[in-house]
Image (spheres, rainbow, N blue to C red):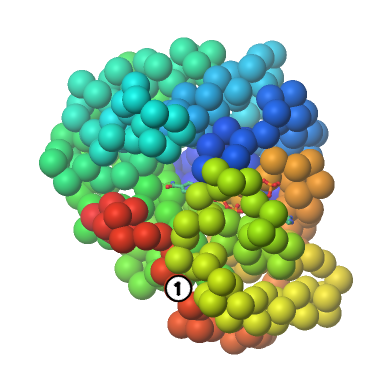
Amino acid sequence: MKTRTLGQGLEVSAIGLGCMGMSFAYGGAPEAESIKTLHHALELGVTFWDTAEVYGPFENEELLGKALKGRRDQVQVATKFGFRISDQGVGRERIAGVDSRPEHIREAVEGSLKRLGIETIDLLYQHRVDPAVPIEDTVGAMAELVNAGKVRFLGLSEASATTLRRAHAVHPITALQSEYSLWYREAEKEVLPTCAEFGIGFVPYSPLGRGFLTGKLKVEELDEKDMRRGLPRFQDEALKQNMRLVDALNQQAEQRGCTAAQLALAWLLAQKPWIAPIPGARKIHHLADNAGAAGIELDSDTQQAISQALPADAIVGERYDEKNQRMTNL
Ligand SMILES: NC(=O)c1ccc[n+]([C@@H]2O[C@H](COP(=O)([O-])OP(=O)(O)OC[C@H]3O[C@@H](n4cnc5c(N)ncnc54)[C@H](OP(=O)(O)O)[C@@H]3O)[C@@H](O)[C@H]2O)c1
């Protein structure tokens, strides 16, 4: 597995592993199966693991804690804080707004360290910008955790270019994690140029369009609790139209003797040398397929052909519902 360097020298596997789906949003997976997937990731060199306090809530960090036993040194552990988590309800129902007050950050990080069973988080992200707390206060509290040895590097998620600049002025930001893929290219407008200006790495989440770009996702087979069932882009009419774009990606992949998933990831890797995508995979064969993308290099003609086959403005439907979309680009 090749590696990539994010801001301030954090070295990670070029292809990471998004662990969310193992415990949250997509219906989860049996614990023993997830632990096998996580350990197999290490054999493949997929060592950049992505989790968050809110995935479960809490269960995903606990799962990683189990998988990390005796293997902590092999992994770059990235987690996130930033939501108020209620005792009421289950899963996503427990999210009760954002909360990046310094005292809440300190408390959340103590919880994450305990569940993960580690002494230091490699990369700590704010999950969503909290409009009620100046970013300077948030990053100030995060920087204190770096000084205390509890965190190595800092990141933000779905922050605007302006917020990223303000944050970076308080303490160097190592990575911005936001949605970026062939079916959501908003980051190219302001955020990626800002990352380039300040030497901040970029971690694309949902790099396979929540599975859609693989051409293999069958919405009718998704778990009842799978959040994708409610997303605008996964509704019947949008799906039908978007499927044409996946057909085009599949054709390109066939010509190159790889899978559509690999091509979608290789395209992201080709955009900048400081981009490290974190595809989510519960299944070992998905993980292995994705790891293979690190070995695929695309020349600029191929990149252009792929961009043309999937024009960003041809995608039908919003990526999020209105409530979730309002929490981004702040
Ligand atoms: N910062 C944020 O706000 C935020 C938001 C969303 C996600 N994330 C992070 O980003 C990670 C990845 O995003 P994501 O899981 O939403 O979407 P994704 O990586 O775009 O897609 C994951 C989906 O694709 C399927 N899949 C993966 N590899 C495949 C392959 N090679 N062939 C066929 N199907 C494949 C997975 O199936 P199986 O799971 O069944 O293997 C899963 O259904 C998450 O795990 C999470 O860590 C962060």
Whole-percent x, y for residue 60 in the image:
55, 28
Q: Residue furthest right?
A: 257
Whole-percent x, y for residue 160 in the image:
28, 58
Q: Residues within 10 Å of mark 1 (few under 14, many from 20)?
A: some
Q: Would you place residue 144 above or below residue 78 in this image?
A: above
Asked whether 183 or 256 is in front, the reply is 183
Left or right: 54 in relation to 51: left
The residue that label 1 is drawn on is 317
The residue under the point 66% across, 59% down is: 220
The residue under the point 82% across, 67% down is: 258
Q: Would you place residue 83 above or below residue 309 in this image?
A: above
The residue under the point 40% across, 17% down is: 111
Q: Amino acid at mark 1?
A: Gly
Q: How many badges with numbers are in the image?
A: 1
Quadrant of the image for the C terminus? bottom left
| Quarter where residue 128 is shown | top left
Q: Would you place residue 210 above or below residue 297 in this image?
A: above
Q: Would you place residue 248 above or below residue 235 in this image?
A: below
Whether ligand 1 has any atom under 8 Å from the Cβ at mark 1 is answered as no
Asked whether 160 or 238 is in front, the reply is 238
| Quarter where residue 92 is shown | top left
Whole-percent x, y for residue 311 in the image:
53, 83
Residue 140 shows up from this direction: no
Circle 1 SS class: loop
Whole-percent x, y for residue 140 in the image:
21, 32
Left or right: 99 in relation to 70: left
Residue 249 shows up from this direction: yes
The residue under the point 28% across, 26% down is: 105
